[in-house]
Amino acid sequence: MPKFIDEATLEIRSGNGGNGMIAWRRAKYEPMGGPAGGDGGKGGNVYIEATRNLNTLLEFRFKKKFEAGNGQKGGISSRHGSAGEHITIKVPIGTVIRDLENDRIIADLTEEGEKIIVAEGGRGGRGNAAMASPTRRSPHFCDPGEKGVMRTIKLELKLLADVGLVGLPNAGKSTVLSVMSAAKPKIADYPFSTLEPILGVVSNFGGDGYVMADIPGLIEGASSGVGLGHDFLKHVERTKVIAHIVDASDENLKSNLKTIEDELEKFNESLIQKPRVIVLNKIDLIDEAEADKLVKDIKKFRSKSDVVSISAATKKNMAEFERLISQELLKVKQIPAPAKEEYIDEKAFDHSDDGFSVTRRKKRFYVDGERLAKLVEVTDARSPESIHHLQGILRSMGVMDALAQEKIKPGDEVVIGSLTFVFGENLF
């Protein structure tokens, strides 16, 4: 099984905010002082950060769930609860983050240290000290903390290589990479000897070098999932220059060339517009005159592309190939880079949890919902003021309307979490 892991699905959850606190000042000469319940702490955030210290998504093969810390409950004497611990997930540069629920891109991390928030922690609930006002000096209620954000995201790694080597299996891409760089890809005389993208650093004439990637062999139908190509075609999208390696000794050379070009265009039309060098490899297996003729024919066939004939096995004409690649890369550098696309990710901050359901069982109505459960959790059932506050929130949430639609009658019971009310007496 290949060690190169370029996709991973993660389940993430930011921390819940802590509940507010109901408390009172207890001074020596003020045994029943004013409100002194502190606010709950904010839940921890979940961040994703790009780093050059990682090359694959291998570490997410087994660890797929990440949770930030929850905020703590507010304390007495107006003390705030402590905030939940943030977590930062490190990913390789070139990682695209996608929301699986709607298949929208959340972010595309292409720079070292680039960091985004993918789930914000819930806010802490207000304690009764914060809820006091000139007309409500001693509130007997507080707010629950917001729940954290839960979501499922997909990480897709797209290699950031300057040059991508593409071609049919056994065209000699791995040999080309091994000759031009210190990379050691597996080389064999059978198809699909390369099962994962291989990167190599090539020192060019200017001395600064560039990154070259050997993309696993493509075949006809790769863009629709045939063979290995569909898994790795996305890595060609980020390359600046494409080097199309073709076996010059193959009698179907032109049709082989067109096969790969068609697959690139089907996968992403922009690929066929990238700067390209067509490389006729294995000319040591044919006559020199025949090699020259092939180059002239291909130039007529593909007039917009540079064409060069080489033998990676004997290193013939490799210097000319390197010169053409460096030349194309220099042209690309002179073209202003497009502005980085910004993605709006509202779901990272979506703490809405007002959803609820009403279930009827004879004369008892069960109202279920996450926010309702938290509201009941911080409600003092012994305090009429606290119950009144809860009822006001239930009205604004539409619980009364939902019960009416279920044909509730006075005397029926309503169960919300651990609280039970008699409709018409102490509810609404």
Image: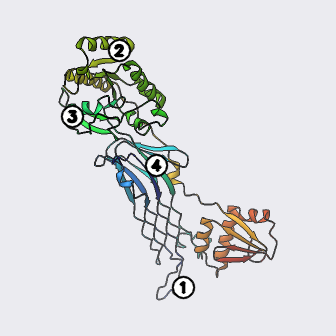
Which residue sits at x=36%, y=46%?
Answer: 114
- Look at mark 2 in the image and give the residue it sits on: 298
Disc 2 crowd rating (10 Å Cα; few below 14, some 14-19, many 20+) is: some
Which residue sits at x=63%, y=67%?
Answer: 372
Q: State if disc 3 and disc 2 touch (CB < 8 Å).
A: no
Q: Quadrant of residue 111?
A: top left
Local SS, label 3: loop
Q: Position of residue 41 (x, y in %)?
A: 46, 67
Structural distance between the alpha carbons of marks 1 and 2:
94 Å
- Look at mark 3 in the image and give the residue it sits on: 181
Q: Position of residue 318 (x, y in %)?
A: 21, 23
Residue in the foreground of this view, choosing between 70 and 150? 150
Residue in the foreground of this view, choosing between 414 and 28? 414
Disc 1 crowd rating (10 Å Cα; few below 14, some 14-19, many 20+) is: few
Amino acid carrying label 2: it is Ile
Q: Position of residue 60 (x, y in %)?
A: 39, 54
Q: Which quarter of the image is occupied by the C terminus?
A: bottom right
Mark drawn on residue 32:
1
Which badge, 2 or 3, is on the more N-terminal residue? Answer: 3
Local SS, label 1: loop
Q: Is residue 137 left or right of residue 199?
A: right
Which badge, 4 or 2, is on the more N-terminal residue? Answer: 4
Mark 2 or 3, closer to the camera: 2
Structural distance between the alpha carbons of marks 4 and 2:
41 Å
- Look at mark 4 in the image and give the residue it sits on: 154
Q: Quadrant of residue 275?
A: top left
Which badge, 4 or 3, is on the more N-terminal residue? Answer: 4
Local SS, label 2: helix
In the rendered view, tell whether residue 95 sits above or below residue 126: above
Mark 4 or 3, closer to the camera: 3
Structural distance between the alpha carbons of marks 2 and 3:
27 Å
